[in-house]
Image: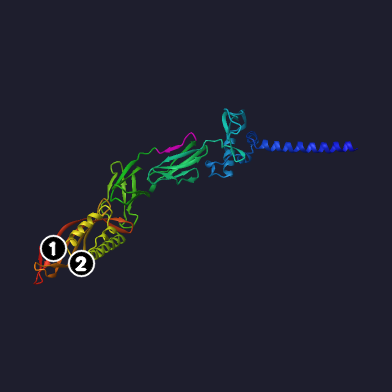
Amino acid sequence: MKVGRKRVIGVTILVGLVVMASCCLWNEYKGQSKYVLNEYLKAMNSRDYKYAVSLIHKDERLEDFSNEELISFMYNYFEEKNFVKVEVSKKEIGVQKVDAQKKVYEVKYIFEAQKVTSTLSLVKVSDRWEVVFPFKMEDVHIYTPLGSSVWFGQEQVTTKEENKYIVKNVLPGNYVTRITFPDEVCEDYITTINVPSETEVVIPYQMVEVSIECMSGTVVELSGEKQVNKNGFVCFENVLEGVYPLKIYDQYGNIEPYEEHISVSQNNKQFKVEELTLSALGNDRLRKSVDAFYNAYLEGIKTHESEFITQFATPEIGPHLIEAFEAWFIKGKDVQDAKMEVEIQEIKMTKEGSLEVETLEVVKMRNKEIDAGGKVYEQEYQVTLKWIMELICQGDTYKLKDRSIEESLVSYKDKDGKWIAY
C-alpha cells in the first residue's frame, strides 16, 4: 500500500510537471510569429475579419481608421472578389535571424476567378508579434482650379498644398471624386478612380494664370484663395475663365480694403490695382507715429540729443538721419529754447508698400552766441524745412526708412524784429 501510494504521488507530480511544461511551451508558441500567422490565416479563412483585424499592427498609416472601418473594408474587399481562402505558399522569404524583429512570408490568396501570390509581414512589437496591414495605401492628389471645393467619397477634402488637394493614406478601392467650382463657372466635375492604380485627378479644362499687380505687403485674395504680396505682384495658377471676386487688404488694417469683381479669360488675365488708400485706422496710426517722432525731435533740439532717432528709424537709415539732425540743430550751435510747428501736406502710398509723407516743419529757436567783442547774446532763428519722409509699417506703428529735404529756408531776426533770409 505504501509503495502504491508513493507511485500515485509520483505520477501526480509528474503529470503536474508535464502540464506545466505544456502550458509554458504553449504560451511560448503563442508568442511566436508562426502562431500569430496561423491565427491570422484561420481568421481570414473562417471570415472572422474582426479577429483578423485584432491581430494587425496599428502603425501611423492606420491612426485615422477605427477597427470597425478596417473590418468593414476587409469584408467588402474580400467578399466582393469572391474570396475562397489564403494559405502560406512559402514559410519564410530570405534568411531571417532567430531574433529578427520582422518576418516575411509568401502567401497565396485564392479567389473564385484567380489566384494571387503576395507577401505577408509580421513585426515584433514589445513581446508580441503583429501582422503588418497587407494592403498598399496611397496619397491621392487632386489638382483643382482656383476657388474650387473637393469631395472624395463622402468626405470633403480640406488638406491643400499649393494648387492640389491631398487625401492621405487611402485604402484600395474605387472612389468617386467630385469637384465644384466657384460661382458656378461650370458644372461639377465628377470622376471615379481606382486606388492604388490611380492616385491623381486632373480636370480636363483649359485654365489660365492670373497676375495681380498692386502694393507690396498686402494680402491678395482671389475667390477665397489668399497670397501675401511680397514683390509688388502675385500670380494665381489654374484659374478657369469666368468672373471672380478680388479683394486686397493688409493684415494690420492700415489700408482700406479694395474689392471688385474681375472677368478672367485668355485675353484678360493681367490686372493692376493702384487706387489703394489709407484706412481711418491706418491714418490714425500714421499721424500718431509722426507726432511721436516730432515730439522727440523738438526735445532733441532743446537737449542737444540725437540718439532718440534710433527708436523711430530702421537700423539701416538711423545713422544717416542722426548725422543730418546734428548738422541742422546741434553741431556749432548752443540752442537755448525752441518751438516747432509741423504740417503733413501730402501722403502717398508707393507700390513697394511704404508711405511717402511730405511734411513742412518750422522750427523757431534761440541760439546762444558771442559777438566780436566777446559779448554773449541770444539770436533768434527760424528754420523752415520741407521733408519727404518714407515710412514703412511695422505692426501698429510706422518707422522711417528714408528722409530727404525738398526745400529749406533759414532766417534770422534782426534788431528791428524782422525776419531776414540767409
The vertical placement of 251 against 15, above or below, is below
- What's the residue at 16%, 57% (across, down)? 406
Q: Amino acid at mark 1?
A: Val
Name which of mark 1 and mark 2 comes first in the sequence: 2
Residue 249, quarter of the rendered image: bottom left
- What's the residue at 57%, 43% (across, down)? 69
Magenta-drawn segment: 196-203
Q: Which residue is mark 1?
A: 410
User: Which quadrant would the N terminus be assigned to in this image?
Assistant: top right
Left or right: residue 184 versus residue 415 is right
Left or right: residue 181 versus residue 9 is left
Q: Report helix, strand or loop for mark 2.
A: strand
The vertical placement of 97 against 358, above or below, is above
Q: CA distance from mark 1 to mark 2?
A: 14 Å
- Where's residue 415, x and y in %? 9, 71
Front-most of 205 and 232?
A: 232
Q: Which residue is mark 2?
A: 340
- Where's residue 190, x and y in %? 45, 40
Left or right: residue 179 versus residue 378 is right
Q: Is residue 401 visible?
A: no
- What's the residue at 20%, 66% (across, down)? 341
Q: Report helix, strand or loop for mark 1.
A: strand
Seen as rendered, the residue at the extreme right is 1
Left or right: residue 222 versus residue 138 is left
Q: Amino acid at mark 2?
A: Met
Instruction: Say which mark, if any, is on residue 171.
Output: none
Prevailing SS of the magenta stretch = loop
